[in-house]
Image: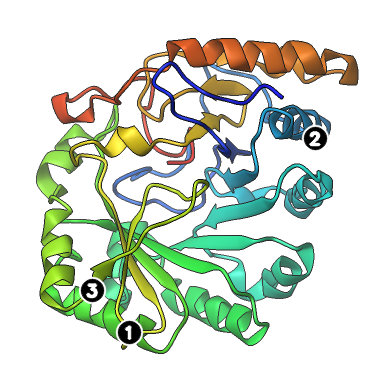
Amino acid sequence: MNILKDSFGRRFPYIRLSITDVCNFKCGYCLPNGYKIDKSDNRTFINTDEIGRLAKALSQLGVSKIRLTGGEPTVRKDFFEIVKILKKNSGIKKTVITTNGYRLDKIANDIKNSGLDGINISIDSLNTDTFKKITGHDRLEEILKGIKKLKNLDFKNIKINAVLLKGVNDSDKDFNDWAEFIKNNEIDFRYIELMQTGDNLDYFNRYHVPAKKFIDYLNNNNWVIQTFGKDAGPSKNYLNPKFKGKFGVIAPYSEDFCKSCNRLRITAKGDLRLCLFGNTGINIRHLMQKDSQLEELKDLILKQLNFKKESHYLEIGETGLTKNLSTTGG
C-alpha cells in the first residue's frame, strides 16, 4: 500500500478536513468582524458524497485519523451525516472534531451517539468577561454546561484549546484557574501560541506571547512532559499525578516544531493544503466526483507531497495563503 510520506521522511496518518468556512463567533485572532462570504470564490462547500470518496482514498493511503474543522463544523445541517460517513469507513480509525461549542449543551447526546472519538472545544478563558471580549459572545456558561453533559454521558476524549494572548489570559491566575478545572476532570487543556495570519498582523504584534511563559509555569509546578502516538496532534502534553487532566502546549514558533508534522489539510472547497501556512494549494475536488476516480485522486495527493516544505517559516513572517484561520481549520 502506498502511504503518505514526504521527501523528509515524515508520514501523514492525520488529516484536518474543513467542512465549512462559516463561523458564528467573532474571535479577535481569527474573524474579529465576523464571517463574510468570499465573493472571489463562488464554489460550494464539499458535499457528503465527495467527503465519502475522499475518506476512502485517504484511508487507502494510510490515513487513520480525520479531524473535522471549520469555520464551525456543527453549523452544517448535515454534520452528523458526515460523521456517519466517516465512521462507516473502516480505514478511518478515529473521527474527531474541533468546535467552539456553541451548541454543545443541545447536541451532547447526538455527539455521544454518533460514535465520534473525540472533541476539541475552544475556550479562551474561564472568566466570563474575558471570554466575551475574545469571542464576541456571552456563551461560556452554555459551553461549560455542554461539557458537563458530555462528561455525564461518559464521553471520554474531551480537550479544550485556548489561544495564549498577552495581557488577556496569560497570568498565573489564568493558569491556576485551568489547573483547578482539570484537577478532578479527565480533560486535556492546551494553550496554543498566537499565530500570525495574512490579515491579523496588528493583533499579532499586540497580543503574541511566547508559549515559553506557560511552559515555565508547568516546569515550576511539577508537570512532566509525556510522549505521544503517531497520529497525535502537535501538542506537547504534560502530566502531574495530582491531577486527573493534562496540560498541553502547541508552540508553532518553537524550534523544530515542523519536524514532527504528521498532518495535511483539505479546505471546505476541496483544496489540498500541505501546510497551514504554505504558499500553494491544489484543488482535488474534481477527482471526488465518481467512484471510478479513486486511483487518480490517490495518485494526485501522493504526487503533491513532493512539494511539501521542511518548515512553515512562520518565524520570519511567512503566512502563505492563510488569510485567517477559519479558511483552513487552524
Q: Is residue 256 visible?
A: yes
The crowd level at tag 1 (other Cα within 10 Å; few <14, some 14-19, many 20+) is few
Query: Which one is earlier in the sequence, the residue at label 1 or at label 2?
Result: 2
Helix, strand or loop under label 1: loop
- Residue located beneath label 2 in the image: 52
Left or right of residue 268, residue 264 in this image:
left
Image quarter hosting the C terminus: top left
Q: Amino acid at mark 3?
A: Trp
**Residue 203 - label:** none
Q: Is residue 56 above or below residue 216?
A: above
Q: Position of residue 83 (x, y in %)?
A: 75, 51
Q: Position of residue 304 (x, y in %)?
A: 54, 12
Is residue 123 depicted above or below 78 in this figure?
A: below
In this figure, which residue is indicated by the disc labeled 1? Answer: 241
- Give me the residue at 35% from left, 17% from top: 309
Residue at left offset 80%, top offset 18%: 294
